[in-house]
């Protein structure tokens, strides 16, 4: 144990003689906190003023954000949907059959629903955040639930909202059972999907919320889609249009994609399809 030593001191504040019991290292700890100029003052204080000085000299460490950006002033925000249904709704796994007593109709692959760029639902209507498909693909019922469970956690009634930009699955996909032989006509329906094109906005989320709070969740959702997808904001979409215009303006190569196809350079006519000439490689 540390030895206790007595010291007869005269307090420089109250000018009284006192006996103080100080353990080894006590004075050293106090003088380390203060400046060297205070050493003489610390050694000549009574116990009462010594405790006051040590109390004032303690520094509490606090973990804070450096250069924290202050939030913008919130204004009156009108939600685009009813407050009672501001969350992403649940779709039916199987669409309703117009004739309940009849067998659901089977369908072909309909690849034209996934070919080319999206020309209608390729912009943000409410102007905040969303997920955009970069290539064509199909959404199954499981992907709808994945998005709904992840996004509805961040939606608060009256403050934030979520809006679907796709409809429920409607296209029937057939599949033969395991071990069955080929033939015997069209197989039964296995599940339903929603086909979409490149550039289609899947859903939007907004309100009194920052992108910093949603970025991690939106990134995970975009990575779990069955096709390439990305997080979009109005600024990102404007930058894409501006970048495309700059590249078109500063292009000095006369042999463009369209020019080479129309003039059959290097016999390319036997390799491309009419869709290549129609979309001109714009399906990202």
Image: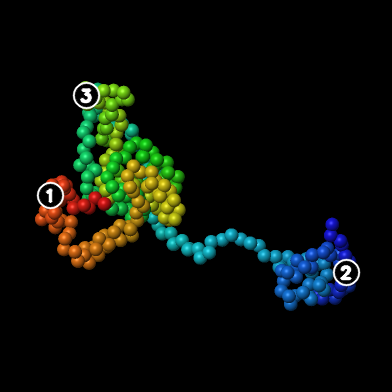
Relative side of 245 to 222, left or right: left
Residue 14: image x %, image y %? 83, 74
In the rendered view, would you say 275 is above or below 233?
Answer: above
- The residue carrying pointer 3 sits among few (fewer than 14), some (14 to 19) or many (20 or more) residues within 10 Å by Cα, namely few
**Residue 165 or 141: which is nearer the viewer?**
141
What is the CA distance from the residue labelled 3 to the residue labelled 1?
Answer: 36 Å
Q: Earlier in the sequence, mark 3 or mark 1?
A: 3
Q: Earlier in the sequence, mark 2 or mark 3?
A: 2
Which label is found at residue 183? 3
Which element type, helix, strand or loop, lies under badge 1?
helix
Q: Is residue 158 visible?
A: no
Residue 114: image x %, image y %? 24, 43
Residue 174: image x %, image y %? 26, 30
Instruction: Please give the name of the residue rendered at 29% of the width and 36% of the height, measured from the top-left corner.
Output: 193
- Which is closer to the viewer, label 1 or label 2? 1
How many labels, in total? Answer: 3
In the rendered view, would you say 173 is above or below 204?
Answer: above
Q: Which residue is mark 2?
A: 7
Q: Residue furthest bottom?
A: 37
- Which is closer to the viewer, label 2 or label 3? 3
Relative side of 73 to 20, left or right: left
Which element type, helix, strand or loop, lies under badge 2?
strand
Which element type, helix, strand or loop, lies under badge 3?
loop
Residue 16: image x %, image y %? 87, 73
Q: Which residue is mark 1?
A: 269
Q: Earlier in the sequence, mark 1 or mark 2?
A: 2
Instruction: Please give the name of the residue rendered at 31% of the width and 40% of the height, measured from the top-left corner.
Output: 139
**Residue 184 or 107: which is nearer the viewer?**
184
Relative side of 103 to 258, left or right: right
Instruction: Please give the name of the residue rendered at 22% of the width and 28% of the height, measured from the top-left corner.
Output: 105
């Amino acid at each position: 144990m540390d030895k206790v030593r007595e010291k007869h001191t005269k307090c420089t504040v109250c000018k009284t003689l006192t006996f103080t019991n100080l353990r080894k290292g006590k004075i050293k700890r106090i003088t380390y906190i203060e400046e060297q100029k205070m050493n003489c003052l610390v050694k000549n204080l009574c116990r009462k003023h010594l405790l006051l000085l040590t109390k004032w000299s303690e520094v509490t460490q606090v973990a804070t954000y450096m250069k924290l950006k202050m939030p913008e002033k919130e204004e009156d925000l009108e939600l685009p949907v009813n407050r009672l249904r501001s969350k992403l709704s649940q779709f039916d796994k199987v669409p309703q059959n117009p004739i309940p007593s009849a067998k659901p109709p089977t369908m072909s692959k309909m690849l034209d629903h996934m070919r080319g760029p999206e020309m209608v639902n390729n912009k943000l209507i409410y102007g905040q955040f969303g997920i955009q498909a970069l290539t064509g693909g199909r959404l199954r019922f499981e992907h709808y639930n994945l998005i709904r469970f992840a996004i509805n956690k961040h939606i608060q009634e009256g403050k934030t909202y979520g809006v679907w930009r796709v409809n429920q699955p409607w296209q029937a996909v057939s599949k033969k059972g395991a071990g069955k032989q080929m033939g015997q006509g069209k197989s039964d329906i296995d599940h339903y999907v929603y086909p979409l094109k490149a550039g289609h906005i899947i859903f939007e989320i907004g309100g009194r919320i920052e992108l910093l709070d949603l970025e991690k969740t939106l990134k995970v959702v975009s990575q779990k889609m069955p096709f390439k997808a990305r997080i979009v904001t109005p600024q990102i979409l404007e930058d894409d249009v501006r970048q495309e215009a700059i590249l078109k303006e500063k292009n000095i190569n006369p042999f463009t994609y369209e020019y080479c196809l129309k003039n059959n350079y290097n016999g390319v006519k036997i390799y491309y399809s009419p869709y290549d000439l129609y979309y001109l490689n714009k399906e990202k």
